[in-house]
Amino acid sequence: MTQTEFLNIVMPFKDKVFRVAKRLLISTEEAEDATQEILLKLWKNKKKMQEYKNVEAFSMTMTKNFCFDKLKSKQAQNLKIVHSNYEDGNTSLQKQVELNDSVNWVGRIIEDLPEQQRLIVQLRDIEEYDLDEIAKMLDMNNTAVRVNLSRARKTIREKLTNTHNYGIK
Amino acid sequence: MVLNNIEKLLEKYDNGETSLKEEQLLKNYFTSDNVAPHLEMYKPMFAYFLVNQQEQFTKDVPLKTTRKFNYKWISVAAVAVLMLGFYLGTSTTKSELGTYEDPQLAYNEVTKSLEMISKRFNKGTATVGYLNEVNKGAATLNYLNEIENSTNIIFKNNK
């Protein structure tokens, strides 16, 4: 397999790998390192890659395992919280600031979720994978994924409603 | 009507039962400008999802094509060297072996070389001649038998 062939396979989902890694590791730098590591691992095993049915799902599972390992290791003791830049040209400045703040607030709520739920929300709501695909990636039961997803969504909604109604943060 | 639909979808959404298409509908609704005021709190959530979808991995990955040394080519080279060696070896020995067309001339040459061989041979055997001296020496050692005779006599007496 040549480098271009490899890149053609990997390019479509490298951003997804990065985002999932970032969701779990929170720090952008850590996530970048993790993505790099995972892509290099794939490159090293490029001969075996033809055997995998779904390289993307396989990479996602790899990412999950790699990030959990990272979180368990002692290196991950000093994680940074990095916020992504948010842009919206349509809304007025006042609204934009407000929205920006509440959008960041969603990020913080998601960070507070248990790792498993965080990962499922990321895979479902941001990467838009099928429930079956997620179940396969995480080596879980379809119903378990659904239950976790539902719990996560309810927690997010509850916290958001509180913030919205009473300004409790 | 639309609002009703959205509310139903939201309930399904919270239970994790919506399909990807339905979720897309929700996303479209909440990122548009006219969201019902009592559903306002959902807005940042969907906005957050949308923003995060656009994040990209910008760092480039150093993909090194590590060329493994191919041991096959060593054997190929070895075979080539061996073939060359055989070829050169056979060609040089062949060129040194001359033949004579005339039988008389060949006969002369053979006698000459045989003569030379016998001369050298005789020379060699002549130098081996001094081995006779060893035999002579061994012959003089026969008197040792005398000693044995006498010792036999002594042993007989002891019995």
Image (cartoon, coloured by chain):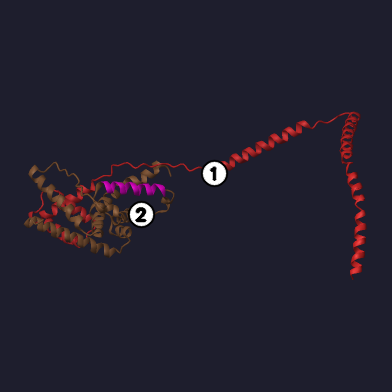
Q: Is residue A70 left or right of residue B126?
A: left
Q: Looking at the picture, does residue A124 appear above or below residue A9?
A: below
Chain ID for label 2? A
* Quadrant (top left, top right, bottom left, bottom right) of the C terminus of chain A: bottom left
Residue A32, given in percent of the width and then of the height, sits at 29, 46
Q: Quadrant of residue B56?
A: top left
A157 and B12: which is toward the camera:
A157
Residue A49, given in percent of the width and then of the height, sits at 41, 50
Quick check: can you spot residue B57? yes
Mark 2 or 1, closer to the camera: 1
Name the tint of chain B in the rendering.
red
Q: Is residue A40 left or right of residue B72?
A: left
Q: Would you call the spot at circle 1 few (<14 residues within 10 Å), some (14-19), or many (20 or more)?
A: few
Q: Would you call the spot at circle 2 few (<14 residues within 10 Å), some (14-19), or many (20 or more)?
A: some
Q: CA distance from mark 2 to mark 1?
A: 33 Å
Residue at mark 2: A58
B59 and B36: which is toward the camera:
B59
Residue at mark 1: B71
Magenta segment, which residues? A29-45
| Secondary structure category for the residue under label 1 | loop
Residue A95, given in percent of the width and then of the height, sits at 9, 46
B28 and A132: which is toward the camera:
A132
Q: Is residue B104 left or right of residue B76?
A: right
